Image (cartoon, rainbow, N blue to C red):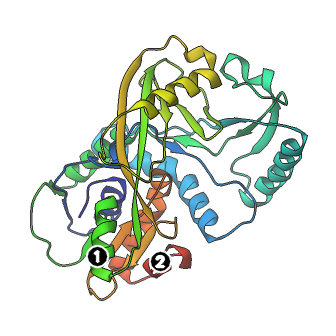
Amino acid sequence: MGAGVFGLSVAWALTQRGARVQVIDPYGVGAGSSGGLVGALAPHVPENWNDKKAFQLDSLLMAADWWADVARAGGSDPGYARTGRLQPVADEHAIALARDRALGAEALWRGAAQWRLIPQDEAGAWAPPSPSGWLIHDTLTARMHPRQAGRALAAALKARGTRIETAGETAGITVWATGWRGLEALSQALGKTVGTGIKGQSLTLRYNAADRPQLFVDGLHIVPHADGTVAIGSTSERSFDDPAGIDSQCDALHARAVAALPLLAGAPVVERWAGVRPRARSRAPMLGPWPGRPGHYIANGGFKIGFGMAPKVAEVMADLVLDGRDAIPSGFRVEASL
């Protein structure tokens, strides 16, 4: 149940292992937050290591091959590329912290990626202003075009004979990957709040920087995509009346992006978007059996990190559903949000 990135990814992993799968979503493929614009697959900082960070690292490292398999199966490009990320460094204290984190990346990222300091000039005109003259450059961060990814997963599933419908009855084992509305339904069923929806707004500009790294400046994501657009996002709104309403907060994102990277000043706006992202109470993805409902499982709560987590989430959910093998970190379990 659910044709967002978690639902489609879990369906793909199950299909790959020979299961017969049907996907049902009354709103269609990528109709919720998985149909957004940004697609920043950025790692947590390499320090204070825990199960959540290790799980995300596994997922980010397996992403290139995983999405390539999806693309080959369905003939549709998900827009994935590991292009890295640049972040400005504020002062001497931040420089020292970045150097410590570079050592942490050496120890924790298995030699597969770097977290390093570079002079601002090294990044050329694409560099955001940095008060210290230095930037953090990590080579683990990747981009994903959310809508293309949904279409690619849907094409891969259909190529393997999996039906994606807008209506139907659940039968047999059911995985609920129904986003923020699903968190509300689960909260009602369990009699306590296990998560909620956080609205976000974003936009895209027409500017071709397809091979450039994404930028993270004062909480703002600037993500170049291969289609000649740059995505800007996003807001985080706990209170909202209209889940899809676009307002002045989106205009503020545009202004902040131009201030962070003046190259974008004349780039026309292609699209503005608003939607609601599922945030579990624990802030981690919520995975595992639905309490008290045998044969029903939950894959939800990928707040801001859903696309980055999706490959690993899909594999551990397939392990659990098909083989009874439970490799879900304790902080990701449904019980962690109860």
For the residues labelled 1 and 2, the Cα–Cα distance comes to: 18 Å
Q: Residue furthest left?
A: 168
Q: Quadrant of the C terminus?
A: bottom left
The amino acid pointed to by label 2 is Arg
The residue sitting at 82% across, 46% down in the picture is 98
**Residue 73 in the image: x percent, y percent?**
31, 47
The amino acid pointed to by label 1 is Gln
Q: Is residue 16 above or below residue 335?
A: above
The residue sitting at 86% across, 42% down in the picture is 95
**Residue 236 in the image: x percent, y percent?**
48, 47
Q: Quadrant of residue 121?
A: top right
Q: Is residue 33 left or right of residue 63?
A: left
Is label 1 in a helix, a strand or a loop? Answer: helix
**Residue 134 in the image: x percent, y percent?**
82, 31
The residue indicated by pointer 1 is 188
Q: Is residue 266 above or below residue 83?
A: above
Q: Give the number of the mark in front: 1 or 2.
A: 1
Q: Is residue 94 above or below residue 329?
A: above
The tag earlier along the polypeptide, 1 or 2, is 1
- Asked if one can make out residue 176 in the rendered structure from this viewpoint, the answer is no
Is label 2 in a helix, a strand or a loop? Answer: loop
- Asked if one can make out residue 180 in the rendered structure from this viewpoint, the answer is yes
Residue 333 is tagged as 2
Q: Is residue 268 left or right of residue 136?
A: left
Label 2, residues with CA under 10 Å away: few <14, some 14-19, many ≥20: many
Q: Is residue 115 left or right of residue 287?
A: right
The residue sitting at 62% across, 71% down in the picture is 51
Label 1, residues with CA under 10 Å away: few <14, some 14-19, many ≥20: few
Q: Quadrant of residue 167?
A: bottom left
**Residue 68 in the image: x percent, y percent?**
43, 45
The residue sitting at 51% across, 47% down in the picture is 64
Which residue is more in the foreground, 216 or 224?
216
